[in-house]
Structures are given as C-alpha cells and as structure tokens.
Image: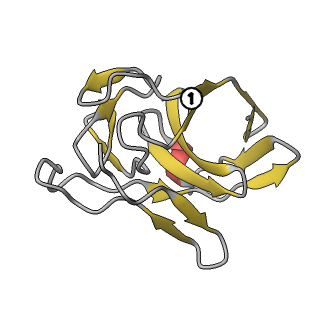
Amino acid sequence: CTCACHAVTLLAAGALSACGSGPSAPSNVPQLGSVASTVSGRTITINVDASQTLSTVGSAAIAQTSLGSFLVARTAQDTFTALTAICTHGQCTVTGFANSRYVCPRHGSQYTTNGAVANGPATRALQQFPTTFANGVLTFTV
C-alpha cells in the first residue's frame, strides 16, 4: 500500500488523522464516536456509564490516548475488546464501524470486534489487548 498518511493522534486538538479516501474506499460507513480515557503508565482506563458511547452491548468507540488510538467494543454486558486502531494493510487509522465490523477508510479492510480480518485487503488481524471491567471501569494495558 502506498498510504502516505500514517495515523497520528493529535491530543491537544482532539483530532484524529485518518487516511483520505482512495479508489476502493468505502462510502457511507458510520464513523466511530470517541470515548474519554486516561493513561497511567501503559494502562488505559475508560469510565463506562449509561450515557456514554459504550453503554450498550454491540457498541464501539475509539479511544485516542498518548499511547496511540484504540478500538473498544462492548461484546457482552461485562465483556469488552480493545484493539489497536492501526490497519494492518496500510497503517491508516480505522475510523468506521458498521454491521459489527470496524472499517478502514482507505481501502475498506474490515475487522471483527475481536480484531480478525473479515474482509481484505488486510491479511493480518489487529493487535488485541486483554481487558478488565469492574464497577463501571474498563482497563487494558498496552
């Protein structure tokens, strides 16, 4: 891939740089909402409450941190997955979510909420991190 834009998290501006659309870029894919997080060492913490993006099973969001950007999905009432948000095909930031799949905006690679490739051109899974959820607080270490 000649994807020239490498994902960069701009914390001060609160913006996310993702690859622009290409000839095979998907159209009309809903964009992930952001979720607030804190970092301590290499541990990321997200408070999950009823008014937040991750409040319902099947929801997903992107956490932009000083350690990178991460895809987070609520896969069951007390179960979450956390993945790197960097597409394994073109190193772009995955920003879309449709039909329970993460979608890369550049070439349309799709990943399950566990990080497995569901549709190429990507051939490698997204890196997954073990999560812990207790008392409304989700944590994972990268």
Q: Percent position (x, y) of residue 75?
A: 49, 26
Q: Nearer the viewer, residue 50 or 88?
A: 88
Residue type of the residue flagged with mark 1 = Thr
**Where 92 sits versus 131, above or below?**
below
Q: Nearer the viewer, residue 23 or 61?
A: 23
Q: Is residue 55 above or below residue 135?
A: below
Badge 1: how crowded within 10 Å, few (<14), some, or many (20+)?
many
Of all residues, the one furthest to the left in this rendering is 23
The answer to whether one can see residue 78 in this image is: no
Helix, strand, or loop for circle 1?
strand
| Marker count (numbered) | 1
Q: Nearer the viewer, residue 91 or 13?
A: 91
Query: Is residue 85 positioned above or below 11 on the image?
Result: above
- Farthest right residue in view: 41
- Locate the N terminus and report the quarter of the image it occupies: top left
Q: x%, y% of residue 27?
A: 14, 55
Residue occupying image coordinates x 48% and y 29%: 126
Q: Which residue is mark 1?
A: 81
Q: Position of residue 65 (x, y in %)?
A: 68, 56
